[in-house]
Amino acid sequence: MHLLDLIRDDKFFKNRKKINLKTTNLSTIFRKHKIKKIDIMSLYTQGSELDIIKGSHQYLKNISLLRVQGDWVLKYLNEPLIGELIAFLIKKNFILLTISPAVTWYDKSISSDILFINKRIVLAKSNSDRVSLKKALKILLSLGKITDVLIILRTNNLPIKFIEKELKNANRFYKYIIHYYPYSKIFAYTYNSIIKLLNIIGFRKISPNFFSLFKFLKIHH
């Protein structure tokens, strides 16, 4: 509220009062609802993400993917910043996959979305972890994280057939690349050149990621 008072004068947030709320932690929720595993958990809780994560205690190791929002600058009283959040999760055996570009708040770069994967399921030493890994890879594909998926597949020596169906369903572009490989390389590079040209003349288009897919197809086909 102090920050808002410094930059706004329209009284939009004039209704201010303090209320007391009884809260609980994630461990209690997991026990109450008999939740054993979570494929993906997303937290966007205005600076309290790390406190909530710490409240999961021993259940944290049973979360496959964790997507949280972290702040680069202090917005809330005593909130941990993004570096502390990342350091804690890495210490708890999570691997940092991506950090999104910082979003702006009144022309200031404020926060980013961060995506983590549990190192335990990436190693997939047990059948249970392997099942969790398969689910996590499908989720990552739905989020457009194809490079991360292919890296994890290779480090686990999983064949392209394992995820080929999901790749085709995730994006029609990938479906044609897989079906017509290696001839699809000509089309893909031509398409990428067209996208770059459109960006130069002012049309903002994002080219699909296919370089890592070509590498994977080269090895497994």
Image (cartoon, rainbow, N blue to C red):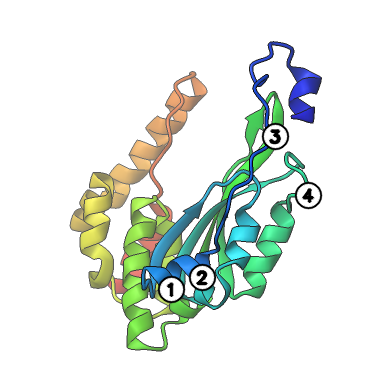
Which of the labelled discs sits on residue 109, or is there none?
3
Q: Which is more N-terminal, label 4 or label 3? A: 4
Which of the labelled discs sits on residue 1, or is there none?
none
Rounded to the nearest whole Å, what is the CA distance between mark 3 and mark 2?
Answer: 33 Å
Name the kind of residue labelled 4 in the image: Asn
Q: Position of residue 173 (x, y in %)?
A: 27, 45
Name the kind of residue labelled 3 in the image: Ser
Query: Which residue appears farthest toward the top when viewing the image?
Result: 10
Name the kind of residue labelled 1 in the image: Arg
Residue assigned mark 4: 78
Quarter of the figure with residue 135: bottom left
| SS under mark 3 | strand
Residue assigned mark 1: 31
Name the kind of residue labelled 2 in the image: Ser
Q: Which is more N-terminal, label 1 or label 4? A: 1
Q: Position of residue 187 (x, y in %)?
A: 28, 43
